[in-house]
Structures are given as C-alpha cells and as structure tokens.
Amino acid sequence: MVLTLLASLCAAIAAGCVFLLFFDLLRMIEIEKQEDEMHEYKRLPLVFRFFLPLVSNVGFIANLPLFDVSRRNTEEMVQMASLDQAVSGQRFFALKIFMALFGFLLFIVFAAMDNALSGLLLGVAFAFYPTLWLKQIVARRHLSILKALPNVLDLLTLSVEAGKDFLTALRDIMARRKVDPLGEELNRVLHEIQLGKGRQTALKEMSERVRQPELSSVVNAIVQADELGVSIGQLLRIQGDQLRNKRFVRAEKLANEAPVKILFPVVVFIFPSVFIILIGPIVYQALRTLAR
C-alpha cells in the first residue's frame, strides 16, 4: 500500500515537473520570439517608430478600396525588404498615409506663419520619405543578394559534388557564413523545411518573397532539376558561371557609366576653380595695368 502511494506520488511529481518544463520551454520560445521581433522593430528609423503607435487612427483610410493596389504594392515591398516581422504591410501603408497627412498639416502651419516654402519642403519630405526609404532598403538588399549568390552557389556546387545532399550542404554553408540578406532568406528556407514544408515549396516562396531576378532564376532551375531528375551539381555550376558573367558585365557597365556621371561635377565645380587659379592672376594684373 505504501509503495503504491509512493509510486503514485513520484508519478505525480514527475508529471508536474514535465508540465513545468514544457510551460517554461513555451515561455522561453515566446520570449525569444519577442526579442527577435523587437530586434526587427529597431531596424525601422526612429521617426517611423514614433508614428507607428498612432497609425491606427487612419486605419480606416488605408483600408478603403481606392487604395487596394497601392496597399498590395506596399505589402509586397515590405516582404521584399524582409520587414514583415517588424511591421505588417498594411500597417506600413497606414504609416505612409499618416505621415502624408502630418506633412500636409505642417504645410498649413508653416503657411499660416508666412513660411510656406519651408512647410512645403517638410510636407513633401514627410509624404515621400517612407516610400523612398523602403525602395532603398529593397534595392540594397537585392544588391547584397546579387553579390553573395555566386559564392554561395560555388560552395554548394563543391559540397554537392563531394557527395552531400543539397539541404545538408546548404545547412553547413549557412552555419559558417556571416548573416547577410541572402543568409537570412536561406536560413528561413531551412527553418521552414525543418517544420515540414517541402523543399520546392519553401524555395518558391522565397523567390516570390524576395523577387530578385537572379535568385528567382536559380530557384526555378533547382525546382526544374528536381522535377526532371537532372544532376543538381552540374546545374549549380552552370548557374554560378552565368551569375559571375552577369556580375562582370554589370561591373563593366558601371565602369563605362562613370565618366558620364562625373562630367557634371567636373564642369560645374572643378573647372571653374581651375580657371580662377590659372586666369585669376592674369586678369588681376590686367585690371591693375588698366587702372594706371
């Protein structure tokens, strides 16, 4: 009887410990998730973080059917910038509307103070800053992915040809690379696959989320290779060579555009200074001679 009671008590204690451990694990996961969201939130500029708590006041305007296309475009841009964990696309669109209205209010205030030009400049800055900032983030992210992709493909090619499967090779490479936009997206793919999502589905969703042409081309090639049973190692090598050639052509194009881009500052800022230095003393002497 005593042994039965002790066994029941031990079982109850063990069950309680398991429950507490499970509850503590859930709490730690929630805390880690909140920390990740806070880290992503801090990526936003200070002015955005200041206005975001207020955007609910214009939520009804952002949800009007008139803005459906603009709202969808903003949601896509937020995903492309990988900011969807910090702020939803709909909320960012509401932020754009709120800042535009705030800019219009500033214009009215400054115009009432007989300083309409300053108000106009501030109003335009507040109205267009969110869109310009988001486009800059997307462009910077795409450029980073374009630069990093050939090297990752080379490492994947070597690993796959050495006998590793695609996911193991990708996981090993991501474990040794520094965190960058491409690494963030590939780590997200690995995490989704670990949660049970298919490899093709995870890769396609990454391609639709990022919308970087070269990355989409690589993803489409990998998906087709899986469907047709083609050797993925040879495919990755071909894709890597093509991307390196594209990167070389792009660098050559930028180098050819450089003289045209520096022509304006040279003519406007450098040539006048050179002329002043060279001709200035001559003109000065000529004026002194004529003055006599």
Image: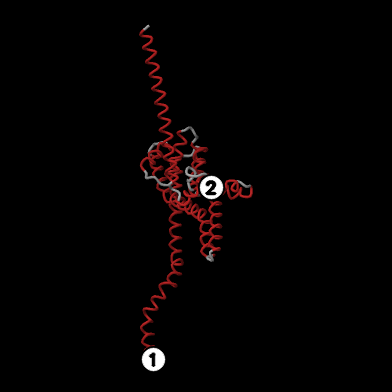
Query: Residue at coordinates 53% horizontally, 46% vertically from top-left?
Result: 91
Crowd around label 1: few <14 · some 14–19 · many ≥20 (10 Å):
few
Q: Residue 31: name its quadrant.
A: top left
Question: Would you identify the image quadrant in which residue 176 lies?
Answer: top left
Q: Nearer the viewer, residue 207 or 268?
A: 268
Residue 81 in view of the camera? yes
Q: Residue 8 at x, y = what percent?
A: 39, 13
Mark 2 secondary-structure assignment: helix
* Circle 2 Cα neighbour tier, 10 Å, few/some/many (<14 / 14–19 / ≥20): some
User: What whole-number distance in Å separates the C-alpha atoms at marks 1 and 2?
Assistant: 70 Å
Residue holding disc 1: 291
User: Which disc, if any, is residue 55?
Assistant: 2
- Give, as a three-letter code, the residue at label 1: Ala
Q: Residue at (55%, 48%) from the top-left corner?
A: 94
Q: Is residue 291 above or below residue 224?
A: below
At label 2, the amino acid type is: Val
